[in-house]
Amino acid sequence: MVFAALLPAFVPAFDPAFVPAFVPHAAPFAGLLPASARASAVVAKAAKRKAAAGKRKPAKPAAFDLKKAMLVAMRAHQDLWRLDPQRECSRDVYVRADGGSRFFFAGKAVGAAGRCDAASAVLLQKRAILEHARLLHPELEQMHRLSRPLQLWAAPADSEVSVARKVQALESLEGARLSRAMREDADAGATLAGFDPDQPESDGRAGFSVRLPEDGVPVAPLEVRFASSVAEAEAMAAQEQEAMAAQQQEAMRKEEEEARPGAGGGAPKPVAPKVTAAAAESATDSGEDSGGGVVGPASAWWAR
């Protein structure tokens, strides 16, 4: 009883949080503390919990799911592609390692008409495009592991043949930036862009790529023809064979005209007369001379 009577007199001299901190079993004595001391202890304990919660590490963001992101992008591309018949918001996308000379085709991007331009459509899907390009082209994956930055480049929609023939330049997207409003709309879940990824060949080979100068502008066009199907390739081969046959016939015709006398091909070539051995001996024995010398088989003009 004496301890209970003297305890309120000494408690105000101590920190209210002192008793619960150093006396774990002080709960039975809590009723002996003044009301103000009990309230202060509760507040101090709550503040301590709040401080401890503030020191916790923030939760790690979820890992990027390329498969899920690509499925969403492909569905969006199917819907937005039909709404852009003039292909004003569409671009072919290429990826290049910094300092490299080869540009790798990654796929086709499209933006929502009137809401997202072509360059922004590519930037909104930058991570998915680069991840896909690294899987499609092993050389890009190797450059990424060597800490070589990967760059995004663009060309007009459906211009793969022109790029391969080196008559179409590529445009760098390094200086392009997204507006804050567009970024906020995309984060809110609005469908602003879609992507159609390029696929590897049936035999497992990587997709299309082209070598260009560092600025993406070709120096000279490549004289080559491309076929989009087997039938078209066979037709092109037949045309080339017909053209070669026509050239050969024309060359033979010119040779015949040049060899024909009086056909404008120059003076006719001299033809050696047929002289028998008896005539040669007769001419030698008779000493016939048409130019001051003895004519014989060894000194005839056609034998010189």
Image: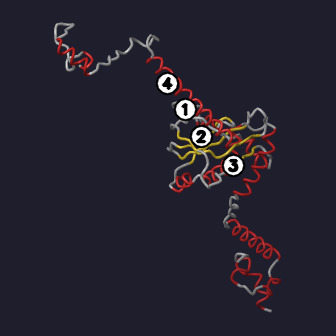
Q: Quadrant of residue 47?
A: bottom right
Q: CA distance from mark 3 to mark 2?
A: 21 Å
Label pair 1/2, CB-CB below 8 angstroms: no
Image point 74% across, 42% down: which residue? 182
Looking at the rendered structure, the kind of residue marked 2 is Glu
Looking at the rendered structure, the kind of residue marked 3 is Pro
Q: CA distance from mark 4 to mark 3?
A: 53 Å
Estimate how packed mark 2 is, as few (under 14), some (14 to 19) or many (20 or more) residues with alpha carbons within 10 Å: few
Q: Label 3: which residue?
A: 197
Q: Say which of 246 and 29 sits in front.
A: 246
Q: Label 1: which residue?
A: 223
Estimate how packed mark 3 is, as few (under 14), some (14 to 19) or many (20 or more) residues with alpha carbons within 10 Å: many
**Residue 176 appears in the rendering:** no
Looking at the rendered structure, the kind of residue marked 4 is Met
Residue 134: % across, % down: 60, 53
Q: CA distance from mark 2 to mark 4?
A: 58 Å
Choose the circle earlier in sequence order: 3 or 2. 2
Choose the circle earlier in sequence order: 2 or 4. 2
Image point 73% across, 67% down: which residue? 50
As helix, strand or loop, the secondary structure at mark 3 comes to: strand
Image point 56% across, 41% down: which residue? 210
Image point 81% across, 78% down: which residue? 34
Q: Label 2: which residue?
A: 174
Label pair 1/4, CB-CB below 8 angstroms: no
